Structure formats: structure tokens, C-alpha cells
Image (cartoon, rainbow, N blue to C red):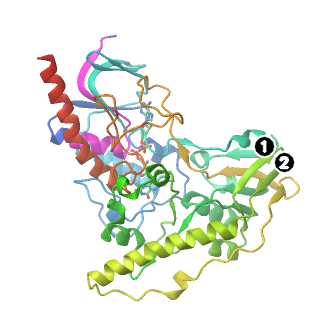
């Protein structure tokens, strides 16, 4: 097969790949977007049925194509998948779907990008394969008794797909709390193992919490200002759900509904699962983080003399943990499924460039790796707190495109 030549290959046709495509086009840079599935594949095949976006419509658009309708409501995940397809057409993104990149290797002319549909020679590569790439499972998951089913959120669609019986959900950030509520409402007994998490109200002083975080500058904070960048990048998502009634979702609500809460998952051996008795500590830390966030919003409101609704005192009432179990015999408890809502890691087995750390994560500074011409986009806190959000990756793409251009100009000069 002929080797095709192009200035830039973008790997991944999700929001980040498309945002990059638009920004490269604006710079007049020739490129192709290689996507192994369909445009926005993960929104088609790796999200559960009832999921609505967690960010409002106002914050869930890419440049040049706003959503019609209520800017303050939340669209279903499936509608966002359709939005991305429309966006790709609108910006005439040169996407080639159904082409998986199997190898990226540096060479004298840049990078050789291999796929089953032939190879590409490019001068630069932008990796946009997603922050939520491989669902993470604790090592001891492999010790779970085989009679108990285990599943990751990327494979979960709806409660009916789970074996009949009780469900243990490990992880209580946005995914864990939403699945706990949905699975419990379907009539199953749910135990939720709670590790580090951050509670926030859906709406505060008359506006969506993310709108306030944006207005007060929190979402645009660059990673380096916060000191411990690795810690910042590992922060779990906020406990929120996107529903028309703007309701909150937090541990107090789930406990009142009948969800049993236990502490951080500590390990499994066969049918026995152990949990740290730390619910009081993790919920106190979560409360502190929420108060810090709300205080910053209050300070922003005061300093800009904004007229808003008063804050609801109930929002700041701390959750009080009650003596929770630290060891459960899952079979005796009737638990037949475990859902690992324990976040994501990223894997790049196809990347043959020395840019991965010991954990297999790409080492970069604001999306620029140590390999000339190799860039990454869409990772958590890449250049700002909202880097992995829909509108955040577009801002990062806008910042990175001139750096891609600079690399192309410099490498052209070297060749001349
Ligand atoms: C449950 C859930 C809900 C979320 N809700 C929101 C929200 O409401 N608002 C918000 O702003 N963010 C949200 N996010 C975070 C983020 O916006 C999404 O994870 C989003 O999908 C990231 O887009 P992306 O383009 O960076 O990556 P992805 O959507 O993961 O796209 C990467 C693409 O790369 C392709 N790919 C991967 N490997 C290869 C390869 N080797 N060759 C070719 N193609 C490849 C994949 O098929 C995929 O289409 C949510 C995340 C999750 C998990």
C-alpha cells in the first residue's frame, strides 16, 4: 500500500480531535483525523442510556456551532454524539472513520503512523484519544469470586443488564453516584463504596455551579499555579447529575433513598470485600473542598457587586457519616454484581516514542511533549482546569495549533 504524506495526523475523532481539526484549518495546516470508530464514538458506545451531559448546553458546544434551545439545560449523551457528527460536517473535518492507529513511530521525516488501511507519513502528530480511555480497576478486582459479575461504566447501559441481586458500586464521583441512584431506583439493593469525592450543589445562588466556576476563573486556572500538578490531574469529577429539575446528587440524598454507604474500597478476596472505615474523613474533606469552592464564588459575587439569590443554608450542612461496615461477605449480602466506577487510565501501546512515564501516561507540558512534533490534547488539566471538558479542549486546541504551526515552520527550515 502507498504511504500517504500529510503535515499532521490527529488520532481520535472525539471533541478534542475535531476541535484540533478546526484550529489547524484556521492556521491553514493540512491534516487528517483518523478515528477507529465513528465520530464521537465513545458517546455512542461507552456511555449508559440515561446519561445526560453534566455540563449545561452553554458549556457543551464547540466553537462555531452553539446549541439551540435552553442554554441552562443538559442534553442526553446520545444527542451530543449527533452534535459531534454535525460539527464534523459543519467544519468539513477531514475525518477518516473506521481506521485504528496501530503504531506511531518517529523517523527522520517526522512520524510514521500505521493503520490497517495503510500508513501515513506526517511531520507532526496530535494524540486526541481521550482522558477517559481505559476504565481503571483496582488490582484485587481479579481476585473477585467468579460467581459475581464485574463491570465498568463504559460497558454499563442500564440496570436490567446486571445479574439479578444486589450491586456493589465502587467509587462515588459523578459516575458512581449516578449509577447508584439509577440502579437503586430499579429496585435493587445498592452498596456504594466512597473514596475521595467532591460534593457540590447543582445550582448555587441562582446559577449552575459550573457557570459560577467559569465566571470566578476556577475553570481556567492553569495547572502550574496549583503546585502539585499530578495531584490536580487525579482529582475525581464533581458529584453532579444533569437533569431538567437541576436536582442535587450527594451522599445524604442517596442514603435517604436507601443506598448503603461504606468507606474506601480496600480489597477483595474471593467473596469478601474490605473497606476502610474512613467515611467520616472523606466526607469531611469533601465538605471542606465544597466550602472552599462556594467561598470563592461568594467572593467573586461580592467583588463584582452582583445581584444574586441568597445562598441556601442547607447547602452548607455537612454530611454526617454513621458507623459503616468495613467487611462484607458479598454472596451472603446478596451482592451479585460489582460496578467499578473508579475512574480511567490511559494506554498507548501503539505509541513507540519515549514520552511515557512509569505509569504509561504521556509526559507533556501543556500538551507539548519532549518529542518535536508530538502533541497531546484532551487530557485532564492539560492547560487549564477544564481541559478535558467539551469547551475546554477547544480552548487548548486554539492554544496548541500555533505551536504545531511553529514546529512545521521550523522543521521546514531545517530541511531547506
Ligand atoms: C460518563 C462521562 C460523562 C462526561 N460528561 C461530560 C460533560 O457533561 N461535559 C464535559 O465537558 N465533559 C464530560 N465528560 C468528559 C469528556 O468531555 C469526555 O470524556 C469526552 O468524551 C472527551 O473527548 P475527547 O475527544 O478528548 O476523547 P474521546 O471522546 O474519548 O475521543 C477519543 C476518540 O479517539 C478514538 N481512538 C482511540 N484510540 C484510537 C486509535 N488508536 N486510533 C484511532 N482512533 C482512536 C476513540 O474511538 C474516540 O472516538 C464526560 C466523561 C464521561 C466518562
Q: Alpha-carbon neighbours of circle 2 within 10 Å: few (<14), some, or many (≥20)? A: some
Comparing 102 with 106, the one in front is 106
**Residue 2 as seen in the image, left or right of residue 236:** left
Tell whether label 1 touches label 2 (CB within 8 Å): yes
Inspect this view and state whether residue 45 appears. Answer: yes
Q: Position of residue 78 (x, y in %)?
A: 45, 53
Residues under labels 2 and 1: Cα distance? 6 Å
Quarter of the N terminus within the rendering:
top left
**Residue 80 as seen in the image, left or right of residue 284:** left
Q: Name which residue lies at 26% across and 85% down.
A: 305
Q: Secondary structure at mark 1?
A: loop
**Residue 84 as seen in the image, left or right of residue 151:** left
**Disc ID at residue 144:** 1
Residue 203 lies, with reference to residue 313, above or below; the image says above
Indicate which disc, 2 or 1, sits on the residue closer to the N terminus: 1
Residue 2 lies, with reference to residue 395, above or below; the image says above
Q: Position of residue 181 (x, y in %)?
A: 63, 66
Quarter of the C terminus within the rendering:
top left
Q: Name which residue lies at 79% across and 54% down.
A: 274
Comparing 386 with 33, the one in front is 386
In which image quadrant can residue 89 be found? top left
Q: Position of residue 51 (x, y in %)?
A: 52, 58
Question: Does the magenta portion include 11?
Answer: yes
Question: Does the magenta portion include 174?
Answer: no
Q: Which residues are magenta?
A: 2-23
Residue at mark 2? 271
Q: Secondary structure at mark 2?
A: loop
Amino acid at each position: 500500500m502507498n504511504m500517504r504524506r500529510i503535515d499532521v495526523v490527529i488520532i481520535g475523532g472525539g471533541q478534542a480531535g475535531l476541535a484540533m481539526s478546526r484550529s489547524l484549518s484556521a492556521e491553514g495546516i493540512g491534516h487528517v483525523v483518523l478515528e477507529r470508530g465513528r465520530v464521537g464514538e465513545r458517546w455512542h458506545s461507552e456511555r449508559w442510556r440515561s446519561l445526560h451531559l453534566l455540563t449545561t448546553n452553554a458549556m457543551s458546544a464547540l466553537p462555531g456551532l452553539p446549541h439551540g434551545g435552553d442554554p441552562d439545560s443538559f442534553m442526553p449523551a446520545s444527542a451530543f454524539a449527533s452534535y459531534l457528527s454535525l460539527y464534523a460536517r459543519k467544519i468539513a473535518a477531514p475525518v477518516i472513520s473506521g481506521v485504528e492507529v496501530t503504531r506511531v513511530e518517529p523517523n527522520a521525516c517526522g512520524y510514521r503512523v500505521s493503520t490497517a488501511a495503510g500508513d501515513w507519513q506526517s511531520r507532526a502528530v496530535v494524540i486526541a484519544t481521550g482522558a477517559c480511555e481505559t476504565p481503571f480497576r483496582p488490582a484485587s478486582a481479579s481476585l473477585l469470586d467468579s460467581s459475581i459479575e464485574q463491570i465498568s461504566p463504559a460497558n454499563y447501559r442500564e440496570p436490567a443488564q446486571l445479574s439479578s441481586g444486589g450491586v456493589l458500586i465502587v467509587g462515588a464521583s459523578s459516575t458512581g453516584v449516578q449509577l447508584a441512584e439509577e440502579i437503586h431506583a430499579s429496585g435493587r439493593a445498592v452498596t456504594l463504596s466512597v473514596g475521595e469525592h467532591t460534593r457540590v450543589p447543582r445550582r448555587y445562588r441562582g446559577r449552575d455551579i459550573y457557570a459560577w466556576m467559569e465566571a470566578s476563573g476556577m475553570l481556567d486556572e492553569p495547572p502550574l499555579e496549583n503546585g502539585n500538578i499530578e495531584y490536580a490531574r487525579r482529582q475525581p469529577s464533581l458529584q453532579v447529575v444533569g437533569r431538567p429539575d437541576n436536582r442535587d446528587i450527594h451522599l445524604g440524598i442517596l442514603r435517604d433513598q436507601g443506598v448503603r454507604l461504606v468507606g474506601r474500597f480496600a480489597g477483595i478476596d474471593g467473596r469478601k470485600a474490605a473497606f476502610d472505615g474512613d467515611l467520616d474523613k472523606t466526607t469531611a474533606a469533601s465538605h471542606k473542598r465544597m466550602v472552599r469552592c462556594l467561598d470563592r464564588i461568594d467572593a467573586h459575587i461580592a467583588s463584582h457587586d452582583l445581584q444574586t439569590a441568597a445562598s441556601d443554608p442547607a447547602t452548607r450542612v455537612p454530611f454526617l457519616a454513621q458507623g459503616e461496615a468495613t467487611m462484607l461477605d458479598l454472596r451472603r449480602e446478596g451482592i451479585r454484581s460489582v460496578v467499578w466506577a473508579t475512574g480511567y487510565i490511559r494506554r498507548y501501546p501503539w505509541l513507540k516514542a519515549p514520552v511515557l512515564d512509569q505509569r504509561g501516561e504521556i509526559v507533556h507540558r501543556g500538551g507539548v511533549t519532549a518529542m518535536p512534533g508530538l502533541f497531546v490534547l484532551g487530557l485532564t488539566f492539560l492547560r487549564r482546569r477544564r481541559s478535558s471538558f467539551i469547551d475546554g479542549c477547544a480552548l487548548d486546541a486554539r492554544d496548541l495549533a500555533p505551536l504545531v504551526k511553529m514546529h512545521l515552520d521550523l522543521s521546514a527550515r531545517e530541511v531547506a
